[in-house]
Each structure stands twice: as C-alpha cells, then as structure tokens.
Image: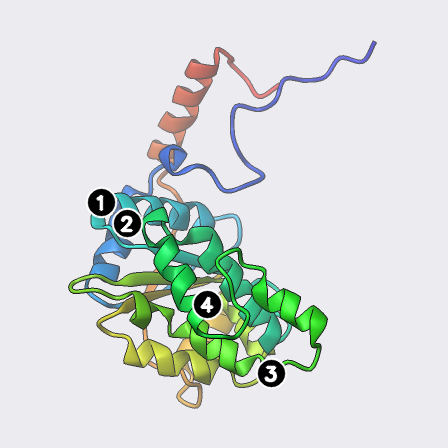
Amino acid sequence: MTTWAEPSPFVFDAPVAPGMLIGRDDEAASLRSWARAGRSTVLVAPRRYGKTSLLTRVQADAERIDRMPVILVDLYELASMSDLVIRLERAWARHVPGRLRSRLARILAGSELGLNVLGTGFQMRLADRPQTDPLPALHALLGLPDQLAGKGSRTLIVFDEFQSIRAVDGAEGLIRTYVQAQREAASYVFCGSQPSMMARIFGDQSRPFYGQAQRFELGRLDTGVLTGAVSDIFDKSGRTDCE
C-alpha cells in the first residue's frame, strides 16, 4: 500500500491569502498610501518574491479600510490588443466589489460593445465576428475608472507582469493617455518580474511611460521575521520538520 507524505503546512505553489502574508505589512501600507494620494507606482521584484501575494493583501485592505476597489489585471504573455481587452474585461468582472457590480453592469451594457459583467462578452463577440476592432472596447474599459468615480473616491488598477505590454504595438501609449488623464479617478500600480525590461519601459525617454511612476523595489523578507513565522507555522501544524 502506497503511503503518501503529509502536505506541507506552507503554501509555496500559489499566492497566499491576505491573512497569511508574512513580513510585508509596511510594503502593503505604503502601496495603499501612494494609491490614496493618486500616485502611479512601479513594483519590481524577481519572480517568487511574493508580488502577487502582496497585491492580494493590498486589494483586501484597500477595499476593507479605504473603500477603494482594486482591479488586478494579469498581463503575463499578452498576445494582442484583443487579448488585452479580454483580460481587462475579465479582471473587472472578477474583482469589482459587489457594491459596484450593478453599476458596472449598466455602464458596460450602455457601451453597446458587447462587454458584460461576466467577463465573457468580448470573447463571445470575437467568436461570432473575428474581424471585430478591439480599440473601441479597449477605450471603454480603460475609461471605466472615470465612469465609476464619485466624490473623493478612486479605483486602483494593477497591471501585473506589465513588461508583457511590449509585445502589443501601441498599447503602452494608449494606456499612458488614460493614466495621465485619470489623476482624480484612478491610481495605478505597474508590476514586473523582469527588472531590466521594466527599467526600459519607465526609464527610456523615448517610451510613453518615461518618468510616469515612482519605483518601488520589493526586497527579500527579513530573515528574523521569516524564521519566526516558519517556527510559528510548524508549531500550529504540530509538526517539527518538512517531511
């Protein structure tokens, strides 16, 4: 009879839940503070440093404490302008808070572009009409923070793996026009796991995002904090090793 090892008490193959994030309280608070102030931020760290887990924590705290919706858009291996529309529509459908869902549904329906709050509208339209121009839908989605903004309220848009935007001609410049115009309605975090590419996007004077965001580099976890957390998790699991 095969004997299977017990699962590790540590989550290592996926982002952790907001309440399980270790040693990133200051970083989460700083990102929320910059978002409340209307700043755009570049968050850079190698893969497996916990960027997505940190962003999930920021999302939870921003909605609970600041009443600020956070829309997380994953751009990993972005392929085309149509792909960008699909990912934006899905991100809004997945992450918009329940208190804004009916309002978002009305806005999308009013655009008459086939977009919907289920996050499937544009993909269905492409299946029916493969030659559909994605630009009108992209403009509508990028403009949603303006449509949702109320007095003193803003939306935080997070583009994860933003270096992938380089694969889509014209996308950088188009997104930049909305970022620049939405100072009162939205804040932006641009995340990347390839520091050299992110440095070119935001540091090259010939690129649309030159000088448009404050850099935030995510460092390694403090050894003492990490050691204490590991011991605490082992204690709670009743185990003394990883076997």
Q: Which residue is mark 3?
A: 133
Tell me which label, 2 or 4, sits earlier in the chain.
2
Judged from the image, the secondary structure of the residue bearing numbered disc 1 is helix
Q: Residue at x 39, y 67 (%)?
A: 107
Residue 35 image point, x, y percent: 26, 61
Q: Which residue is mark 2?
A: 62
Please say if the residues under marks 1 and 2 sit with CB atoms less than 8 Å apart: yes
Q: Is residue 53 left or right of residue 150?
A: right
Residue closest to the eye, 197 or 134: 134
- Measured along the vertical axis of the image, is residue 11 above or below residue 175? above
Foreground: disc 1 or disc 3: 3
Tell me which label, 1 or 3, sits earlier in the chain.
1
Tell me which label, 4 or 3, sits earlier in the chain.
4
Few, some or many C-alpha atoms within 10 Å of disc 4 (few <14, some 14-19, many ≥20)?
some
Q: Which residue is mark 1?
A: 65
Foreground: disc 3 or disc 2: 3
